[in-house]
Image: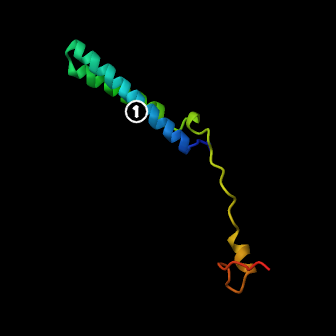
Amino acid sequence: MLDIQTHMDFAGQGKAERWSRFIITFFGIVGLAYGAFVQQFSQTVYILGAGFVLSSLITIPPWPLYRRNALKWQKPIDTDAKSSSSESGDEGKKKKKQ
């Protein structure tokens, strides 16, 4: 089956949020100026809608641009081997230094 990445790292989420806000704000300002120039509020709404669609296409999918800072996960602890080796039930207690 295809190996499609569906995650976005934390830094990528911040970058996507900044891009989204910038694009929608830019299209809102341009749309407001153009709508005021032609005296049609509908043109402002159309331009803002186009900015929303463009922003969604750029920021919602997890493009490789948003997956550059992968987290380094710790290796899982094998709990079966640990519980079978300690039969006294002192798993949570710290050992004293001698």
Give the residue at the far left of this rendering: 39
Residue 28 x/y as whole percent: 32, 25
Residue at the front extreme of this rendering:
98
Measured from the top left, where is residue 49 in percent x and y? 32, 27
Q: Is mark 1 on a helix, strand or loop?
A: helix
Q: Is residue 96 above or below residue 77?
A: below
Q: Which of 66/25 is in front?
A: 25
| Quadrant location, the N terminus | top right
- Identity, as a three-letter code, of the amino acid under mark 1: Arg
* Visible residue check, residue 97: yes
- Can see residue 8? no
Question: What colouring method underlies this structural image?
Answer: rainbow
> Where the C terminus falls, by quadrant?
bottom right
Q: At 55% from the left edge and 37% from the top edge, which residue is drawn? A: 66
Q: Residue at x 67, y 57 (%)?
A: 74
Disc 1 residue crowd, few under 14, some 14–19, many 20+, Cα 10 Å: few
Q: In which quarter of the image is residue 93?
A: bottom right
Residue 94 in which image quadrant: bottom right
Task: Check disc 1 and report the residue beneath it.
Answer: 21
Q: Position of residue 32 (x, y in %)?
A: 27, 21
58 or 69: nearer the viewer: 69
